[in-house]
Amino acid sequence: MNGRWSYMLLALALPAMPIGCSADEKPSAPPPAPARAPEPRAQLKEVRGDVKLKRATGDEWLPAREGLSLFENDKVRTAAGASARVLFPNGSLVNLGEDALIGIAETHSRPGQERTDLTVLKGQVDAALETPSTQSLSVSTPAATVRAGREIVFR
């Protein structure tokens, strides 16, 4: 009877082991998926005067220049007498006046609606939508959030 039980235990244990592995080996996990490069959320245009950029992944304010891509959580700051434009892929355009500070917010798009999300921390921002019927602009401040589908001015 003892030999019969050994045979049954062995028969039950074999299916639990992966094929091609010894009892001491563990199957290797699949390799992790490669990290996707962040997708640009906007681009700087018409940079005039002292305009700085702070990347979400950095701690330093760097000189900004026309054509730089902006990513989620990047910040743009204009000094006295400075200005810049931020162009979003959907055609939305945001003009930064002097002494402004904005952040490129995470965008949560909805089907059929091209949305732009922006955080205004300081200063004046003028915004225009290329096609308000299919675009939306969400501007958050420390005190409020405004969503619009037409030309708007925030002060």
Image (cartoon, rainbow, N blue to C red):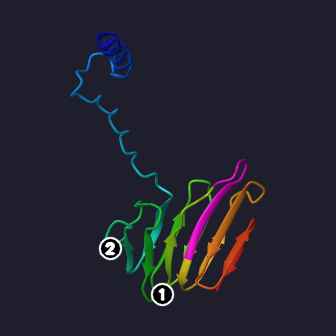
Q: Earlier in the sequence, mark 1 or mark 2?
A: 2
Q: Does residue 15 show up magenta in the picture?
A: no
> Amino acid under label 1?
Asp
Residue at 56%, 79% (x, y): give it.
120
Left of 98 or right of it: where is 127? right
Q: Does residue 135 appear to the left or right of 122 in the view shown?
A: right
Q: Is 110 drawn above or below residue 33 in the view shown?
A: below
Q: Is residue 112 magenta?
A: yes
Does 133 appear above or below 123? Answer: above
Write down the residue under mark 2: 63
Q: Residue at x 21, y 28 (%)?
A: 24
- Asked whether residue 128 is in view, the answer is no
Specify the segment rendered in magenta.
109-119
Q: Nearer the viewer, residue 50 or 146?
A: 146
Q: Is residue 103 visible?
A: yes
Residue located farthest toward the bottom when viewing the structure as drawn: 80
Q: Quadrant of the N terminus?
A: top left
Q: Secondary structure at mark 1?
A: loop
- The local crowd at label 1, few if under 14, some if 14 to 19, many if 20 or more residues have their Cα within 10 Å, is some
Q: Indicate whether 143 appears above or below 65.
A: below
Residue 32 picture quarter: top left
Q: Position of residue 117 (x, y in %)?
A: 60, 66
Decide: is 48 above or below 111: below
